[in-house]
């Protein structure tokens, strides 16, 4: 059996010249300079893990303001320093915080903020063609967040790399001290049941490639298996010349709309059956380092 790379090369050689020279579908490179907009420093969270590996999060204060306020306070208090990644469940989530659940929260952090599971209205400027099993409509906010709606309220969707707040049984809403990111197939059943507060925008490999925990729900049974967290800081806590700079791709323009249509209708020569639609989690707006 041919290796994938050899098979694709053979396919290309056998394909008609017209198919090989067809115009490529719109991509991130087709965005205009004005489509790339800066992510504010106070929305960027820098996690430094053992070994010096760094993961960067973009926070979503518009959609979960109370939980994000807690997260900012926790970072400013250096609360996560010395905690760990203590749960890695295959095809589900990687979770971090205080594995002992005994570390006191800073006095200004609210233990159970409002249940910020819904947004007041759907303001998606780019709507996907088809509904999915969890919503009437899905689309993107102008600033690049994946949204779903039931026609009344809207919410951020649990896609790969999205960050949520771990909690106990309701009425607990979670303080934000215990966070997780999705590392497998999008668990959309968590939508509207847990506060989504952000998205991993770089360094996902340091969370998704960790050994899977063998305890219940992927919790590490041995403390030695955990990955130590050296520090968690907002970019605003770092010196100006050390701050990471990121940009999101704005969605309120025809170029992004064309990209969405290309995701919904993959073209030949490789694709022979266009779907006429796409999953919101397979059409997330791009993030890049500032140029």
Image: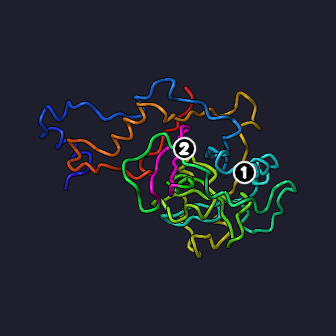
Instruction: Tell me the residue at 14%/32% (across/down).
Output: 18
Is 215 rendered above or below residue 25?
below
Q: Residue furthest right?
A: 107
In this view, which residue lies farthest toward the front? 152
Q: Which mark is residue 97?
A: none
Q: Which quadrant of the figure has residue 153? A: bottom right
Disc 2 is placed on an element classified as: loop
Q: Residues within 10 Å of mark 1 (few under 14, many from 20)?
A: some
* Mark sitting on residue 123: 2
Q: Image check: 284 left or right of 179? A: left
Secondary element type, mark 1: strand
Residue position for label 1: 230
Q: Quadrant of the C terminus?
A: top right
Task: Tell me: 255 left or right of 88.
Answer: left
Q: Nearer the viewer, residue 112 or 122?
A: 122
Q: Which residues are magenta?
A: 135-151
249 or 127: nearer the eye?
127
Is 196 rendered above or below residue 256?
Answer: below
- Image coordinates for residue 196, horizontal then vertical, percent: 61, 55
Q: Nearer the N terminus, badge 2 or badge 1?
A: 2
Position of residue 174 measured from the top left corner of the image (x, y, whole percent): 71, 63
């Amino acid at each position: 059996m041919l290796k994938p790379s050899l098979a694709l090369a053979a396919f290309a050689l056998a394909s008609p010249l017209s198919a090989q020279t067809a115009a490529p579908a719109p991509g991130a490179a087709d965005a205009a300079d004005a489509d790339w907009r800066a992510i504010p420093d106070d929305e960027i969270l820098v996690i430094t893990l053992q070994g010096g590996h760094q993961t960067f999060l973009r926070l979503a204060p518009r959609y979960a303001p109370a939980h994000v306020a807690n997260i900012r306070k926790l970072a400013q208090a250096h609360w996560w320093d010395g905690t760990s990644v203590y749960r890695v469940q295959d095809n589900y989530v990687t979770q971090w915080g205080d594995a002992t659940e005994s570390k006191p929260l800073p006095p200004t952090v609210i233990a159970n903020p409002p249940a910020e599971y819904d947004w007041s209205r759907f303001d998606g400027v780019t709507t996907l063609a088809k509904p999915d099993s969890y919503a009437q409509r899905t689309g993107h906010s102008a600033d690049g967040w994946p949204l779903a709606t039931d026609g009344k309220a809207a919410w951020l969707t649990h896609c790969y790399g999205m960050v949520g707040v771990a909690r106990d049984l309701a009425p607990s809403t979670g303080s934000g001290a215990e966070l997780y990111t999705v590392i497998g197939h999008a668990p959309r059943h968590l939508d509207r049941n847990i506060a989504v507060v952000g998205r991993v925008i770089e360094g996902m490999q340091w969370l998704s490639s960790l050994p899977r925990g063998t305890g219940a729900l992927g919790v590490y049974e041995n403390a030695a298996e955990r990955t130590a967290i050296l520090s968690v800081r907002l970019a605003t806590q770092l010196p100006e010349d050390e701050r990471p700079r990121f940009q999101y791709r704005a969605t309120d323009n025809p170029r992004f709309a064309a990209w969405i249509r290309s995701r919904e209708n993959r073209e030949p020569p490789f694709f022979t059956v266009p779907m006429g639609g796409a999953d919101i989690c397979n059409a997330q707006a791009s993030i890049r380092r500032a140029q």
